[in-house]
Amino acid sequence: MVFHDDDLAGRDGEGMGITETSGVVWETDTETVTSAEVLQSGETVPRLGELLESIPSAVGVNIELKNPGSTSLRFGEKLSGEALDAQKAVWRPFIDRVVDIVSTHDHEILFSSFYEAALAVVAEQSTASVAPILWESVDDGVAIAEAYDADAIHPPVAMIRNTPFFDHGRFGETDLVRTAQRHGWDVNVWTVESWYQADRLLDAGVNGLIADYSTVLPK
C-alpha cells in the first residue's frame, strides 16, 4: 500500500480527514484500504505497482519504507549485532515483496527509511540507492549512511545549519550539509512548508526538498 500515515483517517488516527475510513493500515484488509477515497479526490489508496505504472519511467521515485506492522522496530537508531539481525528478520518479508514489484519497472528508485534495518535489507536484496531519514541523532544518521553506502540523507528542516530554522539546542555545532558534501551525499530535507523555508534551505546548499505541495517553490 502507498500511504504515509499509520491510520487511514490521518496521523495516529486523529481524524485529519485524509480518508473517510479509519483503521491502522497494516491491520486493515486490502479491499478496505484500496477503496478508501483520499481527500475527497475521487482517487483511492493505490498499491505500489499501480502507482509506478502511472509514473513515467524517466521520473525518479523515492520510496519511504514505513513500519510494515510491528511494535518492536527501532526508530531512528544505529544498531549492531544481534539487535540489527533481529530487526532485519522482521523487515525481510515485506521488503522482498517491495523489491520484487520495483524490479518490474524502469524507474530510478531511492529507498529511504527511519529504520536502519529496512535499509540494511534493501542493501542485501537490491542495488538501489538508499537514504536514511534522520531523527534526533545526527551521528546515528551519518553512521547509517556510511554503513550502507548511501546516496543521500534526509534530515529534518531543524538540522540544517546556516538557516533560521536550525535548532542549535538539539544539534549543537552540526554542519550536516558540509558533512554530506564531503561524502558525496545529496541532502533532501523534510518537511518544507513554505517558499520562505525552501529559499533559505536552498541557499544553505541542500539538494532536494520534501514537501506536501510542489507550490513551495515558485514556478
Image: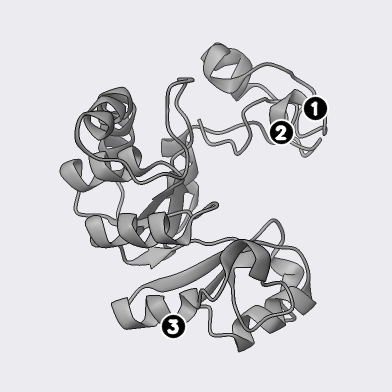
Instruction: For mark 2, give the secondary structure.
Output: helix
The residue located at (77%, 39%) in the rendering is: 41
Residue 28 visible, this angle: yes
- Residue 11, which numbered label? 2
Give the quarter of the image for residue 139: bottom left
Q: Please name which of the two marks, 3 or 1, marks the residue nearer to the observer.
A: 3
- Measuring from the top left, give residue 130's x and y in whole percent: 33, 56
Instruction: From this view, report whether residue 157 is shown above or below residue 63.
Output: below
The Cα atoms of the two marked residues, 2 and 1, are separated by 6 Å
The residue located at (68%, 25%) in the rendering is: 8
Give the quarter of the image for residue 107: bottom left
Choose the circle earlier in sequence order: 3 or 1.
Answer: 1
Marker count (numbered): 3
Asked if labels 1 and 2 touch by Cβ distance under 8 angstroms, the answer is: yes
Say what amino acid the circle numbered 2 marks.
Arg
- Residue 178, which numbered label? 3
The Cα atoms of the two marked residues, 3 and 2, are separated by 33 Å
Give the quarter of the image for residue 101: top left
- Residue 22, which numbered label? none
Left or right for 96, reference 158: left
Q: Characterize the local packing of mark 1: few (<14), some (14-19) or many (20 or more) Cα atoms within 10 angstroms.
A: few
The residue located at (54%, 52%) in the rendering is: 135
Which residue is label 1 attached to?
14
